[in-house]
Amino acid sequence: MLSLTPSPSPSPPPLSSDSEDSGDDYGLVISSPSASNHPPIPTGRQQSFSSSDSLSPPGLSTYHSELATSPITSVFTGPASYRHQSLAVGGGYARPVPRTLQTQQRARQGSSVDFDGIHEHVSASHMSPAQLYTTASGQLFHAGKVCIVLAGLPARGKTHLAVSLTRYLRWLGVKTHAFHLGDFRRASMPNEREVPDDYFLINASPQTVLLRQRVMSACKSAVFKFFDEERGQVAIYDAVNPTSIGRRMLQKEFTQHGIQVLFIESICDNPEIIEANVRSVKISSPDYVGWDENEAIKDYLRRINDKIPHYESIDEVDFSYIKLINAGERILLNNTRVGYLPNRIVFYLMNLHIKSGCVYFARAGRSTETRPKYKSDPHLSGEGFDYAKKLADTLLEHRRNEHKALEEAGESAVQRQLIVWTSTRRRTIESATEFEKLGYSARQRSQLSQLHPGSCDGLTVDELRAAFPEEVENHAKDPYRHRFPRAESYHDLAVRLEPVILEMERIPNDILIIAHVSVLRVLYGYLMACQPNDIPNLEFERNEIVEIIPSAYTNRVKRIMIPGVPPSESVSII
């Protein structure tokens, strides 16, 4: 046994040539039918329009120009003529968004990318944002089929672990899905009154035992379907799994189906972590929607106390298992198979913490140049420095108000530390100066630099079409993975940002990321499990701060308006 202690279309209309300094990235839309012709935006996430499934898999490369931002159209279910096609441009042109679309995007009611898609099933042909290659079987890293079986008492972070692992492995291209046993219980007994009083007891009545077995059978059937029909590679079975005999039965059944089993047990004796997990129940668990906070906590504590006398920790020497102790203070490995994918899982667990801090996204201020090129790397203008002051004032006031609300609610109100990250580009560094003046730590990270424009740097739309007509056509087919000469694609950027993603998972405090639109899109795409073709279309307006609020089951989005920043700056640009 090894003990590790880690350190913490219709024909396109004529193109507009209106120019405006975006301060970030630039672009125009080739084809953009009137918003009034679109069907209503549904409240759920729909299948994205995509031609990428028929394209060759992405490869590793460097350098790509920014992609044009078009309104979010992946949620539309109308004909293909409704699709917006974007065009990469290196110059300083910005496309004004039609007022109807601005209103829709600012309200963002029903926008699919505002909902965490981590619990949605992925299709058999799905390709993830940072996926490096594809195989005929749909399985990567020569790992075969793997079922991760979680174990641990309630409030030990199992759901957080399942969701976080799913998010990370999907990002790498591993077809992963978390199967929460509680979801199957809620599906079979949608009315809470149908749940027997002894359902969560070890020594339940025979009728309750049969009911639990039916729920477990439904969950396992979904796991097998995921492997056999959906070309899945990693299934995460999220349940308490309190007894040795129950775990051994799961091991036997999955092994008989040719599925490797890796147990991960979450052990916690830290009262602060347990209390934080219990209190998060009121906002994250589907079991307690609409409950009074105190009643929800009381009921959940009863569940924990009912399980404790009968829980058996994993000590089967023939099992492959990982014990995660106090959310990463110690990790114990036993009989783990040698392989790239298990090693990546262990590496990720060493970086994972039960994250309580929020992630804030903000754009950089405007530069001194009307049409800045990538090579010029201009400074902030006077307007840009004014924006930086308003950004700092707005965010710090928001955090003070949030802290005050927690105190008034009688909750633990320890003010979390705020860390500021910027790229190494001048505009982002100077946009963080107000925070540094107030004593906040600001760190520059080269990975946060925007997409490199390559040979397209400084080209107008007409010049780009004349120089690279075939590239423009290919880009319209796959705006996420296409790269212009000597340029980067969004896929390249997603691969480049993996160290930043791991550090986001490792840091428990609040993080403000001041970066270019392309970077914010990709990081948002990771935290909200967006589809690749949604990422180039995400909108980040300069007059707002986007806050990602983590919880065990899903992440939530909040937008904080920055007073004094004129709406005219809210244009759809790169």
Image (cartoon, rainbow, N blue to C red):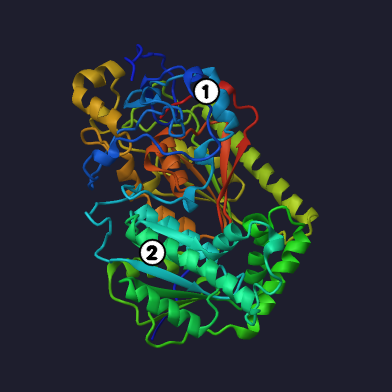
Residue tagged by mark 1? 101
Q: Is residue 277 visible in this depiction of the protein?
A: yes
Q: Residue at x 74, y 54 (%)?
A: 406
Residue positioned 34% across, 47% down in the render: 126
Q: Which residue ends up furthest to the top in the rendered image?
A: 14
**Looking at numbered disc 1 in the image, what kind of residue is underneath it?**
Leu
In the picture, residue 482 is in which quadrant? top left
Mark 1–mark 2 contact, CB under 8 Å?
no
Residue 342 coordinates in the image, percent (x, y): 34, 70
Task: Name the quarter where the C terminus is drawn.
Answer: top left
Residue identified by numbered label 2? 224
Task: Residue at 42% x, 27% y: name it.
Answer: 70
Give the spatial CA distance, label 1 vs label 2: 43 Å
Which one is nearer the viewer's eye here, 205 or 58?
Answer: 205
Residue at x 33%, y 75% (from the top left corner): 256
Task: Give the label on residue 242, or none.
Answer: none
150, above or below 1, in the image = above
Q: Quadrant of residue 145?
A: bottom left
What crowding class fits label 2: few (fewer than 14 Cα within 10 Å), some (14-19), or many (20 or more)? some
Task: List x then y, in percent, for residue 233.
Answer: 33, 61
Give the structural element (helix, strand or loop) at label 2.
Answer: helix
Residue 6 located left or right of residue 158:
left
